[in-house]
Amino acid sequence: MPATLSYFMLPEDERAFFRMLAPKGLTLYPEVFPPGTAGIPADADAPARLDAEAWYLAAEALGPVVVRPVRRGRDKGLLEIEEIPSPVFHYERSVPGAEGEQVGGRLWAELDVTDDPRSKLGKPLALRRIFEEAHAFFRKSWRRSEPKGWWIGPAAAAAWKAGRLVLREPGHKGRAVAVWR
């Protein structure tokens, strides 16, 4: 079962998140990309260079990132990352929606690939540590949501409390989310 963190973050929250990730040496790749594309280092300046809503955070120091060409469809000939054998996180940004509300994002990773804990087929333990450090970062300074299941960045929570921001779950009929307490 994949590990998932769901969140709402404004640009200043996203910069703080990437400042926390900077020492980990992660690299950002789009979901599909042309051959020869160089990744973007995941540092405090990275959010300004992100033009798509979904990216992969690759821990290339932990193992090779496996890519394969897309064989059909509009992205034919481009490369995509294989999530299971690669040490990557899928990062969906929290972006403004069509009606001005902030739509939630998520950080997703398949951290356990096999049922046998002694198997060498699983993900590196360091990848799990990075995910746990991200979760600890959220628990430390971010707010919880009502209904449960979402982390809300400090800037997003302040904007919601001031009445300047509506937080909405992603999807066609995403429900509104509030800051808990």
Image (cartoon, rainbow, N blue to C red):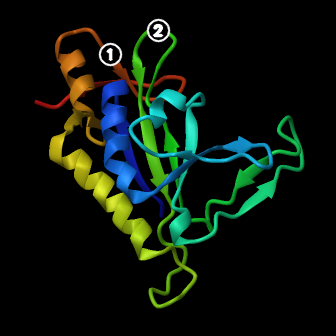
Query: Relative to the observer, which residue lies in front, 2 or 32?
Result: 32
Question: Between residues 75 and 57, which one lies in front from this camera angle?
Answer: 57
55 w.r.t. 124: above or below: above
Please tell me whether mark 1 sits on a helix, a strand or a loop: loop
Horizontal and vertical percent for residue 169? Answer: 41, 29
Few, some or many residues within 10 Å of mark 2 (<14, 14–19, 20+): few
Can you say which quadrant of the picture contains the C terminus?
Answer: top left
Which image quadrant is residue 83 in?
bottom right
- x, y percentage for residue 107? 44, 47
Task: Confirm or deny contact between disc 1 and disc 2 (CB under 8 A).
Answer: yes
- Relative to 110, is 16 on the left or the right? left
Can you give x and y, in whole percent of width and height, for residue 24 in the image? 39, 58
- Give the residue type that dot 2 points to: Glu
Residue 8 visible, this angle? no
Say which element carries label 2: loop
Q: How many marks?
A: 2
